[in-house]
Image: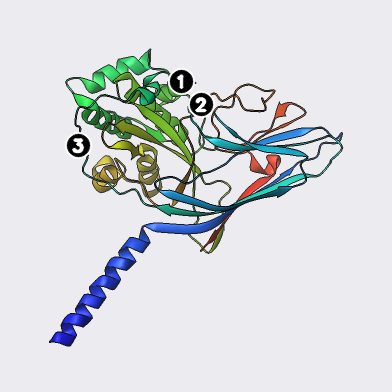
């Protein structure tokens, strides 16, 4: 009997260990850039998100190489995000660089949230203000006020906004990349990709007094080695005083519904999970930055968001939604 108890205890311990490991992912990410050389060589510049460690991810062994002449790491003042800058003179025809690092991620599990009624900290209040392509007036205000009705407190309001977005938007697979995140356009169409749907959540939340921001990131591969160039992803967070930033991903709910042909009645568990939880197959590149003026300053208009590589050749921005023309790739190797 004693031996059976010991064996049972060992098995249970093994299963618990396996369960906890299943919520963590590790891999090597390599971003390669080989800027397309025009017929007449031109100077070029590139800015890349420079990921850092946080509560749910660990970044290690960052390594950067290439034939650029000047480079540096800069900080975006509004969001605090870091990015790597490099430039090439026109004399260098084949312009290339590689940025690689080890990433370890952890699932953000759904927890019981409690609204203590504490005030929003001063440093968080900027996430209540309108932003680049994220207005809080017009049709945003009209919809938001109808959503909140008799709701009180940040938690109730954030959930009401989340439910409205899940129920009243849809994923449009024809949108390029993650979408532009132009709230008024998305509300008019009631459809879009992850940046579009997440930005709608942020705009509506801010209007009803819920601090919120977009999170721009990258999904990790599930195979031993995988091309994840097209795996960029955007979700959202709201700030709950005495708890901190809480993840929400209505865009992934709508993606699952589209891919698996599900109706709202079929997604109860999924809907609950993505209000407060997100899977471990993702990493954060940048949070909350929109309409960014880079350093050294770009020559084109402000950058919508800093998730994809951004480059200019002879002062003209390349299309980061088109990696084949831009000539960049993102590879994942599972550890």
- Chain-order first, disc 1 or disc 2: 1
Residue 83 position in % (x across, y down): 59, 37
Res. 290 mark:
2
Residue at horizontal 34 percent and vertical 48 percent from the top? 108
Q: Is residue 193 visible?
A: no
Q: In the image, which is nearer the foreground, mark 3 or mark 1?
A: 3
Residue 212 position in % (x across, y down): 36, 28
Q: CA distance from mark 1 to mark 2?
A: 7 Å
Residue at horizontal 50 percent and vertical 26 percent from the top? 78
Q: Is residue 65 visible?
A: yes
- Chain-order first, disc 3 or disc 2: 3
Q: Are marks 3 and 1 in contact (CB under 8 Å)?
A: no
Direction from residue 265 to residue 288 in the image, left or right? right
Tag 3 residue: 114
Q: Are marks 3 and 2 in contact (CB under 8 Å)?
A: no
Residue 247 position in % (x across, y down): 35, 39
Q: Mark 2 packing: few (<14 Cα in 10 Å), some, or many (20+)?
A: many
Q: In this rendering, is residue 176 above or below 98? A: above
């Amino acid at each position: 009997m004693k031996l059976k108890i010991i064996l049972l205890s060992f098995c249970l311990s093994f299963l618990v260990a396996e369960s906890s490991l299943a919520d963590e992912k590790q891999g090597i990410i390599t971003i390669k850039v080989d800027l397309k050389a025009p017929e007449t060589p031109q100077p070029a510049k590139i800015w890349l998100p420079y990921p850092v460690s946080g509560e749910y991810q660990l970044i290690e062994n960052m390594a950067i190489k290439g034939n650029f002449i000047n480079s540096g790491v800069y900080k975006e003042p509004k969001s605090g995000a870091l990015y790597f800058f490099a430039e090439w003179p026109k004399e260098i025809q084949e312009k290339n660089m590689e940025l690689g690092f080890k990433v370890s991620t952890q699932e953000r599990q759904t927890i019981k949230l409690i609204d203590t009624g504490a005030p929003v900290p001063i440093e968080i209040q900027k996430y209540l203000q309108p932003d680049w392509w994220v207005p809080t007036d017009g049709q945003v205000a009209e919809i938001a006020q109808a959503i909140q009705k008799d709701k009180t407190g940040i938690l109730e309001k954030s959930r009401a906004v989340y439910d409205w977005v899940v129920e009243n938007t849809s994923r449009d697979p024809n949108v390029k990349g993650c979408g532009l995140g132009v709230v008024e356009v998305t509300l008019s169409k009631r459809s879009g990709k992850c940046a579009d749907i997440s930005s709608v959540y942020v705009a509506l939340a801010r209007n009803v007094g819920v601090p919120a921001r977009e999170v721009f990131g990258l999904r990790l591969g599930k195979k031993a080695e995988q091309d994840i160039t097209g795996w960029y992803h955007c979700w959202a967070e709201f700030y709950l005083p005495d708890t901190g930033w809480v993840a929400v991903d209505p865009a992934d709910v709508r993606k699952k519904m589209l891919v698996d042909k599900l109706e709202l009645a079929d997604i109860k568990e999924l809907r609950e999970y993505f209000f407060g939880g997100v899977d471990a197959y993702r990493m954060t590149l940048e949070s909350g930055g929109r309409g960014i003026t880079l350093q050294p300053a770009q020559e084109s208009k402000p950058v919508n968001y800093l998730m994809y590589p951004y480059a200019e050749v002879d002062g003209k921005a390349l299309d980061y939604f088109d990696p084949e023309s831009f000539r960049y790739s993102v590879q994942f190797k599972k550890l």
